[in-house]
Amino acid sequence: MKRILIAGLFHEGNSFSSLVTGEASFAVARDEAVLAKARTSNAALGGAFRYLCEQPVTLLPVTTAIAPPGGPVDDDVYARLRSEIADAVRTSNPDGIYLDLHGAMITQTRDDPEGDLLATLRDAVGSKVPIAASLDLHAYVTAAMLGSADIIVACKENPHTDYDEAGAKAAELLMQLLEGAIKPVTAAIWLPLIIGARMETANGPLARLHETRRELIARSTNLLDISIYNTTTLLDVPNGGQCITAIADSDSAAAHEAVETLARAFWAARDEFTHELPSLASVMADLRAGRIAPLVILGDQGDRVLAGTPGDGTAVLHELMTDWPDIRALVPVTDADVVRAAGRVGIGESLRSAVGGRFSEGVTPVVADWQVLALGDGRFVQEGPFLADEPAELGDTALLRTGNVTVLATTLPGFTQDPQAFLSQGADPAAFDVMVTKSGHHFKLSFARIGRCIVIDTPGISNYRVGGVPFRKRRPIYPEDPVEITELASHLFWSAATS
């Protein structure tokens, strides 16, 4: 019976946020609680767990920690979580390691903590113990990560409906490597390119690229996986463009050819990643005229917590209150100060307070008289399908109303792409004409069954425009800079466990 250690550390970073991601933002499970969560989780951990349960292995659960996207993780918090996992690896002496990672975490002083974590674990177990990790397709994949892990694969769909499949694939390749059935070699190539629009994989240029990916795998007997990484826009990191990886069984030529073929197609499509989103005014006019029916669920493109913003933007809130006073609206806003103030006055009471604009530059707070409708602890379990059955934290919350608008004020930025973020805190979306989520893609998976989902063009750093994000480390990069590519060359990473 092989002994497989499983752990996870999941956070997507925003280099430009002033809000540090602390311990309170993480939902943490340890030891047997990891297995209890994994049994029903739709995250990569759940897929890996269910695959491994069918194999002749003993599972060694350690720690999983997941937080919503946001500012850099506190250095000490990361160091403690890394130590928990590394200490368990050293004491348990596993035969193999599976990790559920996002791949785009940053900390206050580290651009590549996942690379650091994987290197720490490699040092702990030596070269012969295989390490496999599954990543989000918006990961920042580095040579340090690929040099320390034997297997790294991404989910393939955005919105992410296949986290569990990515986890299962990583676990499957880990087992094949342990059994000596494969000798994996990974080719990787990086493109100096940012994409901030048309990022869904079911249509547009990414749909074509993924179709090519599937064709390349179908034609080859040796390709085990090809992953395309659309590195999240709000990271300011070295070599932070697009990445493509291919894992082959002993066949470095096949891996090289796959990533270079896709890289050429990707670069040729670089000018197609532009969007035109509807304005809030146009959507509200359609709603008022009856051309679309309530409930309408809006994705706030410029203030997407799922892209790492603090979630304290108020542009939509201002416009709904000023221009559409007859439309009942529910809006989430990160504002710990107003949550504390509401807690002091209590449910049923009123307070005059500013809401929003605590962290993001250029955001005007909304000042009004608010009635406190409910107070909550911010804990909930996500309904999914994105991250289904994963616990989440909003911090303490307050449900506040003024005129036609109800605000779910949260202490922490949170996963508001999920209906349970609202229902668990006393706000029923069905009672409104329109509601807002701080998401641009994944809210569609959860809300489509109860209303019309529309992403709207709103101001904010997560609504990428050339020149609108102050990149320093990530440059030169297209379209921020006039980059020319004369050669596309991939790099090889051999599995240490098979050498």
Image (tube, rainbow, N blue to C red):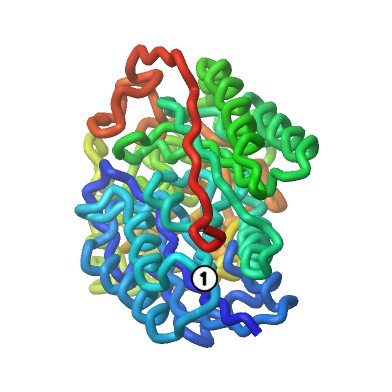
The structure residue drawn at horizontal position 36% and vertical position 72%, both measured from the top left corner, is 124
Which quadrant of the rendered structure holds the N terminus? bottom right
Q: Quadrant of residue 294?
A: top right
Crowding around mark 1 (Cα neighbors within 10 Å: few <14, some 14 to 19, many 20+) is many
The residue lying at 30 percent from left, 36 percent from top is 238
Residue name at image x 72 percent, y 52 percent:
449
Q: Nearer the viewer, residue 457 or 47?
A: 47
Q: In the rendered image, is residue 191 in sight?
A: yes
Nearer to the camera, 30 or 410: 30
Image: 282 above or below 449: above
Residue that label 1 marks: 97
Q: Secondary structure at mark 1?
A: strand
Question: In the displayed structure, does residue 454 sit left or right of residue 320?
Answer: right
Q: Is residue 20 above or below residue 58?
A: above
Where residue 454 sits, quadrant-wise, is: top right
The relative height of residue 1 versus residue 153 in the rendered view (above or below) is: below
**Is residue 318 shown left or right of residue 453?**
left
Q: Position of residue 36 (x, y in %)?
A: 59, 82
Three-letter amino acid code at the position of disc 1: Ile
Which one is nearer the viewer's eye here, 171 or 448? 171
Q: Percent x, y for residue 236?
A: 29, 38
Q: Position of residue 193 (x, y in %)?
A: 43, 26
Name the side, left or right, on which 139 lies relative to 361: right
Q: Residue furthest front?
A: 499
| Residue 283 appears in the figure | no
Give whichever of 2, 209 is nearer the camera. Answer: 2
The residue at the point 40 percent across, 49 percent down is 104
- Residue 37, located in which quarter of the rendered image? bottom right
